[in-house]
Image (cartoon, grey):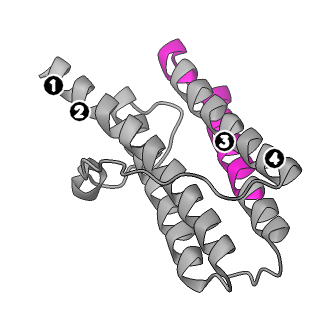
């Protein structure tokens, strides 16, 4: 894991990770075999772009203290088999991919918060983890609604 010397290093790292997520979802959208799946992946990419923009704003304005709030976790992703991303995956599989991607990002930021050298950096990592948790919850709620609607 990288060693960070400043909050700007953290933000740069986080923005790179968000860009990787944008690229991942954009690539899947470009290879999707149905309009529905293309739209789903484009929506995911836009969500990550918004997150990256938020990080850029934090870096530009120097505002590192974000309010913390409790984010529910339905833990749906904990009980699903990992799905390998593919252009022909179902909507349900796409939601599983998205949940797992957000879960991994959450775990990364939580691990970084535990290794943060000062309280300000720890709070920033926890804030980033919280954002990823919100994204995961959004996908879990959509999955829950979709599965119940289909069954």
Question: What residue sits 36% from the left and 51% below the top?
Answer: 70
**SS state under label 1:** helix
Q: Residue 19 placed where, x, y %?
A: 74, 48
Q: Quadrant of residue 127?
A: bottom right
Mark 4 to mark 2 CA distance (whole Å):
32 Å
**Circles 1 and 2: CB atoms closer than 8 Å:** yes
Q: Residues within 10 Å of mark 4 (few under 14, many from 20)?
A: some
Q: Judge depth for marks 1 and 3 and give the one in front.
A: 3
Q: Residues within 10 Å of mark 3 (few under 14, many from 20)?
A: many
Q: Nearer the viewer, residue 5 or 93?
A: 5
Of the residues under marks 1 and 3, which one precedes in the sequence?
3
Point out the residue furthest to the right here.
60
First of labels 1, 4 by sequence position? 4
Looking at the picture, does residue 50 appear above or below residue 40?
below
Specify whether residue 34 is painted magenta.
Answer: yes
Q: Tell me the SS state at disc 2.
A: helix
Q: Earlier in the sequence, mark 3 or mark 2?
A: 3
- Give, as a single range, the part of the protein colored magenta: 16-38
| Secondary structure category for the residue under label 3 | helix
Residue 144 is tagged as 2
The residue to which callout 3 is attached is: 51
Q: What is the x, y in percent for residue 4?
A: 78, 80
Q: Is residue 50 left or right of residue 83?
A: right
Q: Quadrant of the N terminus?
A: bottom right
């Amino acid at each position: 894991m990288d060693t960070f010397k400043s909050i700007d290093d953290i933000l740069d790292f986080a923005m790179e990770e968000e860009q990787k997520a944008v690229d991942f979802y954009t690539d899947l959208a470009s290879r999707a075999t149905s309009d529905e799946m293309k739209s789903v992946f484009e929506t995911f990419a836009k969500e990550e772009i918004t997150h990256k923009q938020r990080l850029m704003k934090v870096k530009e304005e120097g505002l590192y203290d974000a309010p913390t709030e409790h984010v529910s976790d339905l833990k749906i992703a904990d009980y699903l088999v990992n799905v390998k991303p593919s252009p022909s995956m179902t909507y349900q599989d796409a939601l599983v991919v998205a949940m797992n991607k957000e879960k991994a990002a959450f775990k990364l930021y939580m691990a970084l918060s535990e290794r943060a050298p000062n309280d300000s950096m720890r709070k920033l990592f926890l804030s980033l983890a919280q954002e990823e948790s919100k994204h995961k919850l959004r996908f879990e709620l959509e999955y829950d609604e979709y599965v119940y609607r289909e069954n």
